[in-house]
Amino acid sequence: MKKRLVYHIVAQPYWEVATEFTINKMKADGLWDNFDDIHLCCHYEPEKFSEFVETMSQDKRITCHVFSDSVRRRGETWTNNKLKEVCDKDTEEWAVLRLHNKSSNYYDPNNVPPGSSYTPPNGDYNFDRTFPFLWRDLVYYWNIERWELMTKKLEEVEIVANEWLTQYFAHAGGNIYWVRSSYIKRLGYMPLPTHFNEWTGFPIAWEHPRHEVESWSGSGNPTAWAAYPSLSSWTFNNWDEHKEGAPFNDREISQ
């Protein structure tokens, strides 16, 4: 299958640092050059993306979509609909990585070195700062560094992720995943919210309406494969074990 990237990017403090880190990660792991089609979905403040769009558009594989109407902190709804719009035009199967800058809210050069990985000493960690980067590193490890494994698994199922959760609603942990374009074509378009706290009723949500965008990935009842069962099954003390995928890297889940 050809490979496509649909990448959600938002204008917030240090978005340039987070985006540079993520793209450099894809380049270092050999993934960036293997994409045949790239869609960059840029949100909230169009003027902040002018130079970025001009630079990135020099790559003929890249299409930049700048959204001025998306609702802050709900912009992934627009990105999901763009993902569907692109896949609806496909006449062949694509392997699509749905990506965003994980933990980008926690980038702060005064407190946390951007791009750093963290190994907490003796389990003593600052939850607000350390955990998000450990989580980012784990999500990026499977979806970016192990992209060859993930795309191979995608030959067998419809969606693959570092984690596939079903406790409240089916979705990929971290809302980053590899998916077949044919599965995305089965999904419906999401209603667009008019403000952050609006419940649109599609497809389902938990605690807060922002979870609607996460539940969209599981709303078509896909066959799924996950690198490990659940975030709750690992602790900071067995981080290396889970990074290597043992013993969960062959766990298949069918919905």
Image (cartoon, grey):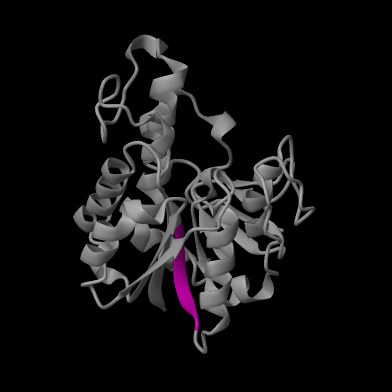
Specify whether residue 94 is painted magenta. yes
Position of residue 169 in the picture relative to residue 146 (left or right): right
In this rendering, is residue 47 above or below 105? below
* Viewer-side residue, 146 vs 134: 134
Quarter of the figure with residue 233: top right
Q: Residue furthest front?
A: 47
Residue at horizontal 32%, vertical 56%? Answer: 49
Of the pair 53 and 4, the residue shown nearer to us: 53
Identify the residue shown where x is 62% and y is 50%.
214
Relative to 136, is 46 above or below?
below
Q: Does the magenta stretch mainly form a helix, a strand or a loop?
A: strand
Which picture quadrant has residue 187? bottom right
- The answer to whether residue 42 of the structure is visible from this angle is yes
Q: Is any atom of residue 157 visible in this view?
A: no
Residue furthest to the right in view is 201
* Residue 57, above or below 73: below
Estimate the x, y position of residue 143 in percent, counting from the top left: 40, 53
Quadrant location of the C terminus in the rendered image = bottom right
99 to the left or right of 255: left
- Magenta region includes residue 138: no
Q: Quadrant of the N terminus?
A: bottom left
The residue at the point 67 percent across, 59 percent down is: 192
Q: What is the tally of numbered marks visible in this picture?
A: 0
Q: What x and y, as percent, mark residue 109?
A: 25, 26
**Range of residues picked out in magenta:** 93-98
Q: Residue at x 40, y 14 (%)?
A: 125
Apparent side of residue 33 relative to residue 106 in the rendered image (left or right)? left
Q: Where's residue 216, x and y in %? A: 66, 57
